[in-house]
Image: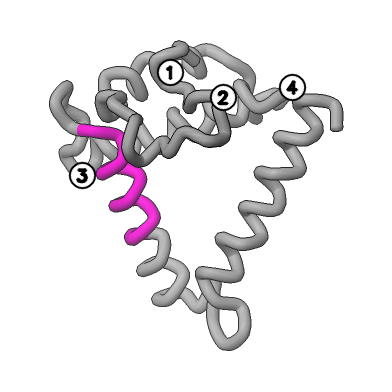
């Protein structure tokens, strides 16, 4: 990750007011997804970079399918649309229903994400 894409380390700085980063464009996602080409199937996951590469590959396939793969398209929109479409899938096929809501699925995913972050930094 480039330093232009990391938040300031100063906890007193408000990133909302000082963050001047450009949105991540889909051409960056395409480059990351290309790193997965020719790799083993299923993917070998050795850490968070591998996890991000697999996610970029999935996002890139989705973006191409729905026409969000232009150089001017931003990744935020593609991620947002993918999540919305996953919500439709979960609702339609009753992957999530009753107490097992999409929000609870996202909460579980966040717990996995945080555990993997801790694992990566040795906590």
Q: Which residue matches tag 1?
A: 32
In the structure shown, which secondary structural element does the residue marked by tag 1 occupy?
A: helix
The structure residue drawn at horizontal position 25% and vertical position 24%, both measured from the top left corner, is: 22
The tag earlier along the polypeptide, 4 or 2, is 2
Q: Give the range drawn in magenta.
A: 74-85
Q: Which residue matches tag 4?
A: 46
Q: Work out how far the residue at label 4 is from the one at label 1, CA to CA, in angstroms.
A: 16 Å
Foreground label between 2 and 3 = 2
Q: Work out how far the residue at label 3 is from the one at label 4, CA to CA, in angstroms.
A: 30 Å
Q: Position of residue 68 (x, y in %)?
A: 19, 37
In this orientation, which residue lies closer to the viewer: 99 or 115?
A: 115
Query: Looking at the image, what colour scheme do you see?
Result: one colour
Local crowd size for mark 1, using a 10 Å CA cut-off: few (<14), some (14–19), many (≥20): some
Position of residue 81 relative to residue 73, above or below, is below
The tag earlier along the polypeptide, 3 or 4, is 4
| Left or right: 86 as drawn, with respect to 66 | right
Q: Main secondary structure of the magenta part?
A: helix
Report whether residue 121 is seen.
Answer: yes
The structure residue drawn at horizontal position 53% and vertical position 69%, both measured from the top left corner, is: 103
Q: Which residue matches tag 2?
A: 9
Q: Where is residue 57 in the image (x, y as percent from the top left)?
A: 44, 29
Q: Residue furthest front?
A: 12
Q: Where is residue 55 in the image (x, y as percent from the top left)?
A: 50, 34
Position of residue 103 relative to residue 38, above or below, is below
Q: Work out how far the residue at label 4 is from the one at label 2, CA to CA, in angstroms.
A: 27 Å
Q: Work out how far the residue at label 1 is from the one at label 3, CA to CA, in angstroms.
A: 19 Å
Q: Which residue matches tag 3?
A: 66
- Give the quadrant of residue 39: top right
Local crowd size for mark 4, using a 10 Å CA cut-off: few (<14), some (14–19), many (≥20): few
């Amino acid at each position: 990750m480039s330093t232009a894409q990391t938040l300031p380390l100063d906890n007193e700085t408000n990133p909302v007011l000082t963050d001047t980063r450009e949105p991540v464009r889909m051409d960056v996602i395409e480059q990351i997804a290309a790193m997965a080409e020719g790799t083993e199937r299923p993917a070998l996951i050795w850490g968070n970079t591998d996890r991000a590469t697999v996610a970029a590959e999935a996002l890139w396939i989705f973006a191409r399918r729905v026409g969000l793969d232009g150089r001017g398209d931003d990744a935020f929109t593609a991620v947002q649309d993918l999540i919305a479409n996953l919500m439709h899938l979960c609702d339609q096929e009753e992957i999530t229903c009753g107490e097992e809501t999409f929000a609870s699925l996202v909460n579980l995913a966040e717990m996995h994400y945080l555990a993997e972050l801790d694992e990566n930094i040795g906590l």
